[in-house]
Amino acid sequence: SQTIHQWPATLVQPVGSPLSLECTVEGTSNPNLYWYRQAAGRGLQLLFYSVGIGQISSEVPQNLSASRPQDRQFILSSKKLLLSDSGFYLCAWRKPGQANTEAFFGQGTRLTVV
Amino acid sequence: DAKTTQPPSMDCAEGRAANLPCNHSTISGNEYVYWYRQIHSQGPQYIIHGLKNNETNEMASLIITEDRKSSTLILPHATLRDTAVYYCIVRVNYGGSQGNLIFGKGTKLSVKP
């Protein structure tokens, strides 16, 4: 069966510090991978998606970047965090190439920038 | 993308059916309707999806109107653990977006004893 791992679960970082959040998927090959962010009291915003190694698409301009160094690994990064980067970050995966497959989400990382 | 409109909140008594509406009047013919829910501080959980026909699984039923402009998610016997934010999503599927799920604000369902 497929599983998705996301860590850490919580993180408190000072403004200006770097960020690296990691997400890995097991039990599937060549998944579509996604990073979402949920600010306090708001809906989920799609940040990045990837359809393959080294292929990253950004949905919104921001202070963050994403990378996919391996097929089932998706990393969210920042060189210098801003207060506005605080939020709940979620990684998700979906089977590629099919029009009606569901997405599976990790348990999320709650980031607080202080 | 087709947009969805949901009431911001609803209450339901424990053991009763919860009927959550969603309007998607601009839906295209090949776009599916998906429902997810998010329990506080957890990742969203897939519930059900459909294209034209009504669907049922172990969690819920999805009723889609004949013109596909609206749908209703039905939790037949709501429990306290069903308290969550429920998202109705029409799946984008064009060009390079690879069918990304675009979430709105959802409906906060509160199941009360």
Image (cartoon, coloured by chain):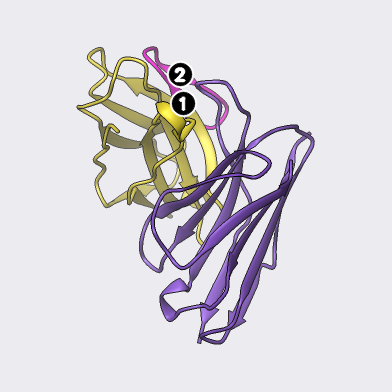
Q: Colour of chain B?
A: yellow
Which residue is identified by label 1? B49
Which residue is identified by label 2? B55
Seen in the image, is B6 located left or right of residue A49?
left
Name the residue at 39% across, 12% down. Answer: B53
Say if A84 sits above or below A114 in the image: above
Chief SS of the magenta region: loop
Q: Amino acid at mark 2?
A: Glu
Say if B55 sits above or below B77 in the image: above
Does the image show residue A30? yes
- Which residue ends up furthest to the front in the rendered image? A54
- Crowding at dot 1, Cα within 10 Å, few <14 / some 14-19 / many 20+, comes out as many
Say if B18 sits above or below B105 in the image: above
Asked if labels 1 and 2 touch by Cβ distance under 8 angstroms, the answer is: yes
Q: Amino acid at mark 1?
A: His
State which quarter of the image contains the N terminus of chain A: top right
Q: Which of the 4 quarters of the picture holds residue A60?
A: bottom left
Q: Which subunit holds the residue at mark 2?
A: B
